[in-house]
Amino acid sequence: MTAPHRIVFANEKGGTGKSTTAVHVAVALAYQGARVAALDLDTRQKTFYRYCENRADTQERRRIALPGPVFDICHGDTVEQLEEEAARIGEGMDYLLFDTPGRDDPFARHVAASADTLVTPMNDSFVDFDLIGQVDAESFKVRKLSFYAELIWEARIKRSRATIEQQKREMDWVVVRNRTGYTDARNQRRIDDALTELSKRVGFRAVQGLSERVVYRELFPSGLTLLDKGHLGELGTSHLVARQELRNLVGNLNLPIPQHPEGEQARTATTKMVEPA
Ligand SMILES: Nc1ncnc2c1ncn2[C@@H]1O[C@H](COP(=O)(O)OP(=O)(O)OP(=O)(O)O)[C@@H](O)[C@H]1O
Ligand SMILES: [Mg+2]
Protein backbone atom coordinates (compact mmCIF):
# COMPACT_ATOMS: atom_id res chain seq x y z
CA MET A 1 0.00 0.00 0.00
CA THR A 2 1.48 3.36 -0.97
CA ALA A 3 1.36 6.26 1.45
CA PRO A 4 -1.27 8.95 0.75
CA HIS A 5 -0.22 12.09 -1.04
CA ARG A 6 0.37 14.72 1.63
CA ILE A 7 -1.09 18.16 1.07
CA VAL A 8 -0.03 20.63 3.73
CA PHE A 9 -1.63 24.06 4.16
CA ALA A 10 0.91 26.25 5.85
CA ASN A 11 1.91 29.84 6.26
CA GLU A 12 3.37 31.13 9.51
CA LYS A 13 1.31 34.26 9.10
CA GLY A 14 -2.19 34.09 10.58
CA GLY A 15 -5.44 34.64 8.74
CA THR A 16 -4.23 34.11 5.19
CA GLY A 17 -6.91 31.54 4.28
CA LYS A 18 -5.26 28.22 5.14
CA SER A 19 -8.29 26.66 6.81
CA THR A 20 -10.81 28.00 4.29
CA THR A 21 -8.74 26.77 1.36
CA ALA A 22 -8.03 23.43 3.06
CA VAL A 23 -11.73 22.70 3.69
CA HIS A 24 -12.70 23.57 0.13
CA VAL A 25 -9.91 21.50 -1.39
CA ALA A 26 -10.75 18.52 0.86
CA VAL A 27 -14.41 18.63 -0.13
CA ALA A 28 -13.62 19.13 -3.83
CA LEU A 29 -11.37 16.06 -3.82
CA ALA A 30 -14.02 14.00 -2.03
CA TYR A 31 -16.52 15.06 -4.69
CA GLN A 32 -14.10 13.72 -7.29
CA GLY A 33 -14.37 10.33 -5.60
CA ALA A 34 -11.00 10.43 -3.85
CA ARG A 35 -10.46 9.07 -0.37
CA VAL A 36 -9.49 12.03 1.73
CA ALA A 37 -8.26 12.20 5.32
CA ALA A 38 -7.38 15.34 7.22
CA LEU A 39 -5.63 16.22 10.45
CA ASP A 40 -6.05 19.63 12.03
CA LEU A 41 -2.82 20.66 13.75
CA ASP A 42 -4.22 23.97 14.95
CA THR A 43 -5.30 22.61 18.30
CA ARG A 44 -6.15 26.06 19.61
CA GLN A 45 -8.46 27.44 16.91
CA LYS A 46 -9.45 24.10 15.32
CA THR A 47 -11.07 25.92 12.39
CA PHE A 48 -10.72 23.01 9.98
CA TYR A 49 -11.97 20.51 12.53
CA ARG A 50 -14.88 22.72 13.55
CA TYR A 51 -15.87 23.29 9.92
CA CYS A 52 -15.96 19.54 9.29
CA GLU A 53 -17.76 18.93 12.56
CA ASN A 54 -20.45 21.41 11.45
CA ARG A 55 -20.58 19.61 8.11
CA ALA A 56 -21.06 16.23 9.77
CA ASP A 57 -23.83 17.71 11.97
CA THR A 58 -25.62 19.19 8.94
CA GLN A 59 -25.35 15.85 7.22
CA GLU A 60 -27.07 14.13 10.09
CA ARG A 61 -29.63 16.86 10.78
CA ARG A 62 -30.78 17.13 7.17
CA ARG A 63 -30.28 13.45 6.42
CA ILE A 64 -28.18 14.17 3.37
CA ALA A 65 -24.85 12.82 2.18
CA LEU A 66 -22.11 15.43 2.14
CA PRO A 67 -18.85 14.24 0.59
CA GLY A 68 -15.85 15.20 2.65
CA PRO A 69 -12.81 13.97 4.52
CA VAL A 70 -12.38 11.62 7.41
CA PHE A 71 -11.08 14.14 9.90
CA ASP A 72 -9.53 14.49 13.30
CA ILE A 73 -7.56 16.87 15.40
CA CYS A 74 -3.97 16.12 16.31
CA HIS A 75 -3.74 14.68 19.82
CA GLY A 76 -0.04 13.87 19.90
CA ASP A 77 2.60 15.61 21.98
CA THR A 78 5.58 14.58 19.89
CA VAL A 79 6.40 14.37 16.21
CA GLU A 80 6.49 10.57 16.53
CA GLN A 81 2.96 10.55 17.93
CA LEU A 82 1.82 12.89 15.17
CA GLU A 83 3.24 10.47 12.59
CA GLU A 84 1.45 7.57 14.28
CA GLU A 85 -1.84 9.46 14.02
CA ALA A 86 -1.09 10.36 10.42
CA ALA A 87 -0.41 6.70 9.61
CA ARG A 88 -3.66 5.65 11.26
CA ILE A 89 -5.97 8.19 9.67
CA GLY A 90 -4.15 8.04 6.33
CA GLU A 91 -4.34 4.28 5.91
CA GLY A 92 -5.89 3.38 2.56
CA MET A 93 -6.42 7.05 1.70
CA ASP A 94 -5.46 8.83 -1.51
CA TYR A 95 -4.78 12.17 0.12
CA LEU A 96 -3.83 13.22 3.61
CA LEU A 97 -4.35 16.92 4.31
CA PHE A 98 -2.88 18.89 7.18
CA ASP A 99 -4.13 22.27 8.27
CA THR A 100 -1.58 24.10 10.40
CA PRO A 101 -1.64 27.09 12.76
CA GLY A 102 -0.61 30.54 11.55
CA ARG A 103 2.49 30.74 13.71
CA ASP A 104 5.83 29.03 14.04
CA ASP A 105 5.10 25.61 15.44
CA PRO A 106 7.24 22.45 15.51
CA PHE A 107 4.46 20.23 14.14
CA ALA A 108 3.72 22.68 11.33
CA ARG A 109 7.40 22.73 10.42
CA HIS A 110 7.55 18.97 10.47
CA VAL A 111 4.56 18.43 8.17
CA ALA A 112 5.59 21.31 5.87
CA ALA A 113 8.97 19.66 5.43
CA SER A 114 7.31 16.32 4.67
CA ALA A 115 4.70 17.66 2.22
CA ASP A 116 4.27 16.31 -1.29
CA THR A 117 2.29 19.44 -2.08
CA LEU A 118 2.83 22.45 0.15
CA VAL A 119 0.08 25.03 -0.21
CA THR A 120 0.81 28.52 1.13
CA PRO A 121 -2.14 30.87 0.83
CA MET A 122 -1.43 34.58 0.90
CA ASN A 123 -3.42 37.72 0.34
CA ASP A 124 -2.39 40.29 -2.24
CA SER A 125 -0.49 42.32 0.28
CA PHE A 126 3.19 42.91 0.98
CA VAL A 127 2.41 42.21 4.62
CA ASP A 128 1.69 38.59 3.67
CA PHE A 129 4.47 38.56 1.11
CA ASP A 130 6.97 39.40 3.86
CA LEU A 131 6.65 35.86 5.15
CA ILE A 132 8.28 34.58 1.97
CA GLY A 133 10.55 37.42 1.00
CA GLN A 134 11.39 41.03 1.79
CA VAL A 135 11.13 43.67 -0.90
CA ASP A 136 13.01 46.92 -1.37
CA ALA A 137 11.04 49.96 -0.18
CA GLU A 138 11.69 51.97 -3.35
CA SER A 139 11.91 49.46 -6.18
CA PHE A 140 9.77 46.60 -4.77
CA LYS A 141 12.50 44.21 -5.96
CA VAL A 142 13.04 41.16 -3.76
CA ARG A 143 15.90 41.88 -1.35
CA LYS A 144 16.03 38.86 0.88
CA LEU A 145 14.38 35.51 1.43
CA SER A 146 12.47 35.14 4.64
CA PHE A 147 13.17 32.64 7.36
CA TYR A 148 10.23 30.56 6.16
CA ALA A 149 11.43 30.36 2.56
CA GLU A 150 14.88 29.34 3.83
CA LEU A 151 13.28 26.67 5.98
CA ILE A 152 11.47 25.10 3.03
CA TRP A 153 14.58 25.41 0.88
CA GLU A 154 16.61 23.49 3.45
CA ALA A 155 13.92 20.84 3.82
CA ARG A 156 14.00 20.24 0.09
CA ILE A 157 17.79 19.93 0.01
CA LYS A 158 17.68 17.51 2.91
CA ARG A 159 15.07 15.42 1.14
CA SER A 160 16.97 15.34 -2.11
CA ARG A 161 19.94 13.88 -0.21
CA ALA A 162 17.89 11.32 1.71
CA THR A 163 18.92 7.71 1.41
CA ILE A 164 15.43 6.31 2.07
CA GLU A 165 13.44 6.34 -1.18
CA GLN A 166 10.19 7.41 0.55
CA GLN A 167 11.87 10.56 1.89
CA LYS A 168 13.35 11.46 -1.48
CA ARG A 169 10.04 12.62 -2.96
CA GLU A 170 10.01 16.04 -4.49
CA MET A 171 7.94 18.79 -2.97
CA ASP A 172 5.68 20.95 -5.08
CA TRP A 173 5.35 24.30 -3.34
CA VAL A 174 2.30 26.23 -4.45
CA VAL A 175 1.64 29.79 -3.31
CA VAL A 176 -2.08 30.37 -3.60
CA ARG A 177 -3.37 33.91 -3.91
CA ASN A 178 -6.40 34.13 -1.71
CA ARG A 179 -9.09 36.80 -1.35
CA THR A 180 -8.15 38.36 -4.66
CA GLY A 181 -10.15 41.03 -6.41
CA TYR A 182 -10.21 43.78 -3.82
CA THR A 183 -6.81 45.41 -4.34
CA ASP A 184 -6.17 47.93 -7.08
CA ALA A 185 -4.50 46.98 -10.34
CA ARG A 186 -1.17 48.68 -9.49
CA ASN A 187 -0.77 46.86 -6.21
CA GLN A 188 -1.70 43.59 -7.87
CA ARG A 189 0.92 44.13 -10.59
CA ARG A 190 3.65 44.86 -8.05
CA ILE A 191 2.76 41.69 -6.20
CA ASP A 192 2.71 39.78 -9.51
CA ASP A 193 6.20 41.00 -10.37
CA ALA A 194 7.64 40.32 -6.92
CA LEU A 195 6.05 36.86 -6.85
CA THR A 196 7.40 35.98 -10.27
CA GLU A 197 10.91 37.00 -9.22
CA LEU A 198 10.69 35.20 -5.92
CA SER A 199 9.17 32.04 -7.41
CA LYS A 200 12.29 31.62 -9.54
CA ARG A 201 14.60 32.10 -6.57
CA VAL A 202 12.74 29.91 -4.13
CA GLY A 203 11.13 27.41 -6.48
CA PHE A 204 7.40 27.73 -5.96
CA ARG A 205 4.49 28.15 -8.32
CA ALA A 206 1.96 30.93 -7.82
CA VAL A 207 -1.63 30.07 -8.63
CA GLN A 208 -4.94 31.85 -8.34
CA GLY A 209 -7.01 30.87 -5.31
CA LEU A 210 -10.41 32.00 -4.08
CA SER A 211 -11.54 35.54 -4.61
CA GLU A 212 -12.95 37.68 -1.84
CA ARG A 213 -16.53 36.55 -1.23
CA VAL A 214 -18.79 36.89 1.77
CA VAL A 215 -20.10 33.38 1.16
CA TYR A 216 -16.78 31.85 2.31
CA ARG A 217 -17.38 33.37 5.73
CA GLU A 218 -21.07 32.54 5.88
CA LEU A 219 -20.97 28.82 5.17
CA PHE A 220 -18.91 27.91 8.22
CA PRO A 221 -21.81 27.28 10.69
CA SER A 222 -23.42 24.74 8.35
CA GLY A 223 -20.10 23.32 7.17
CA LEU A 224 -21.38 23.57 3.61
CA THR A 225 -19.23 24.56 0.65
CA LEU A 226 -20.01 26.03 -2.74
CA LEU A 227 -19.84 22.54 -4.18
CA ASP A 228 -22.87 21.33 -2.24
CA LYS A 229 -25.33 22.13 -4.98
CA GLY A 230 -28.95 21.70 -4.04
CA HIS A 231 -28.28 22.28 -0.34
CA LEU A 232 -27.38 25.95 -0.43
CA GLY A 233 -30.67 27.66 -1.17
CA GLU A 234 -30.73 30.71 -3.42
CA LEU A 235 -27.22 31.87 -4.17
CA GLY A 236 -27.34 33.65 -7.50
CA THR A 237 -25.08 33.30 -10.48
CA SER A 238 -21.85 34.77 -9.05
CA HIS A 239 -21.46 31.49 -7.21
CA LEU A 240 -21.17 29.62 -10.45
CA VAL A 241 -18.05 31.66 -11.09
CA ALA A 242 -16.84 30.94 -7.56
CA ARG A 243 -17.37 27.21 -8.02
CA GLN A 244 -15.33 27.31 -11.20
CA GLU A 245 -12.61 29.22 -9.35
CA LEU A 246 -12.41 26.44 -6.83
CA ARG A 247 -12.28 23.76 -9.51
CA ASN A 248 -9.50 25.67 -11.26
CA LEU A 249 -7.57 25.91 -8.01
CA VAL A 250 -7.81 22.16 -7.39
CA GLY A 251 -6.80 21.50 -11.02
CA ASN A 252 -3.81 23.83 -10.68
CA LEU A 253 -2.54 21.94 -7.65
CA ASN A 254 -1.54 19.21 -10.16
CA LEU A 255 -2.25 16.42 -7.71
CA PRO A 256 -1.67 12.82 -8.72
CA ILE A 257 -4.87 11.07 -9.82
CA PRO A 258 -5.78 8.25 -7.46
CA GLN A 259 -5.80 4.76 -8.93
CA HIS A 260 -8.61 2.71 -7.43
CA PRO A 261 -9.19 -0.90 -8.30
CA GLU A 262 -12.36 -1.48 -10.34
CA GLY A 263 -15.49 -0.93 -8.28
CA GLU A 264 -13.65 0.51 -5.33
CA GLN A 265 -14.17 4.15 -6.16
CA ALA A 266 -15.05 5.82 -2.86
CA ARG A 267 -17.98 7.73 -4.35
CA THR A 268 -19.96 7.64 -1.16
CA ALA A 269 -17.21 8.84 1.17
CA THR A 270 -18.92 11.35 3.41
CA THR A 271 -17.57 13.70 6.02
CA LYS A 272 -16.72 11.61 9.02
CA MET A 273 -15.25 12.35 12.39
CA VAL A 274 -12.76 9.84 13.74
CA GLU A 275 -14.25 8.05 16.72
CA PRO A 276 -12.24 8.58 19.91
CA ALA A 277 -10.11 5.49 20.64
N1 LIG B 1 -11.80 34.02 -0.17
C1 LIG B 1 -12.30 34.55 0.95
N2 LIG B 1 -13.30 35.47 0.90
C2 LIG B 1 -13.77 36.01 2.04
N3 LIG B 1 -13.35 35.72 3.27
C3 LIG B 1 -12.36 34.80 3.39
C4 LIG B 1 -11.78 34.17 2.25
N4 LIG B 1 -10.82 33.31 2.68
C5 LIG B 1 -10.81 33.41 4.01
N5 LIG B 1 -11.71 34.30 4.46
C6 LIG B 1 -11.98 34.71 5.85
O1 LIG B 1 -10.76 35.22 6.39
C7 LIG B 1 -10.57 34.80 7.73
C8 LIG B 1 -9.29 33.99 7.84
O2 LIG B 1 -9.41 32.80 7.03
P1 LIG B 1 -8.89 31.39 7.55
O3 LIG B 1 -9.38 31.11 8.92
O4 LIG B 1 -9.17 30.42 6.48
O5 LIG B 1 -7.33 31.72 7.58
P2 LIG B 1 -6.16 30.90 8.31
O6 LIG B 1 -4.94 31.16 7.51
O7 LIG B 1 -6.56 29.50 8.50
O8 LIG B 1 -6.06 31.64 9.70
P3 LIG B 1 -5.20 31.16 11.00
O9 LIG B 1 -3.77 31.44 10.64
O10 LIG B 1 -5.72 32.02 12.08
O11 LIG B 1 -5.46 29.70 11.16
C9 LIG B 1 -11.83 34.02 8.09
O12 LIG B 1 -12.73 34.91 8.70
C10 LIG B 1 -12.36 33.54 6.74
O13 LIG B 1 -13.76 33.33 6.76
MG1 LIG C 1 -6.63 28.33 10.25
Image (tube, grey):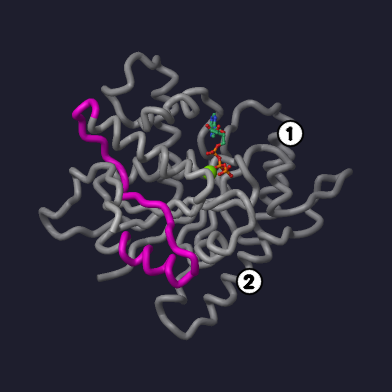
In this orientation, does residue 31 appear? no
Q: Quadrant of ligand 1?
A: top right
In this rendering, the answer to whether 271 lies above or below 170 is above
Q: Residue at x 48, y 41 (%)?
A: 47
Q: Secondary structure at mark 2?
A: helix
Q: Quadrant of residue 140?
A: top right
Q: Residue 55, percent across and down?
A: 33, 35
The quarter in which the N terminus is drawn is bottom left
Q: Residue furthest left?
A: 263
Q: Quadrant of residue 203?
A: bottom right
Q: Secondary structure at mark 1?
A: helix
Q: Is residue 88 part of the magenta span, yes or no?
A: yes
Q: Which residue is mark 2?
A: 154
> Is disc 1 surrounded by few (<14), some (14 to 19) or many (20+) residues within 10 Å?
few
Query: In the picture provided, is 235 more to the left or to the right than 183?
Result: left
In this rendering, the answer to whether 153 lies above or below 161 is above
Q: Which residue is mark 1?
A: 187
Q: Residue 195, percent across and down?
A: 67, 48
Which contiguous range is marked in magenta?
Answer: 61-89
Query: Which residue type carries mark 1?
Result: Asn
Q: Residue at x 41, y 60 (%)?
A: 6
> Disc 1, disc 2: CB below 8 Å?
no
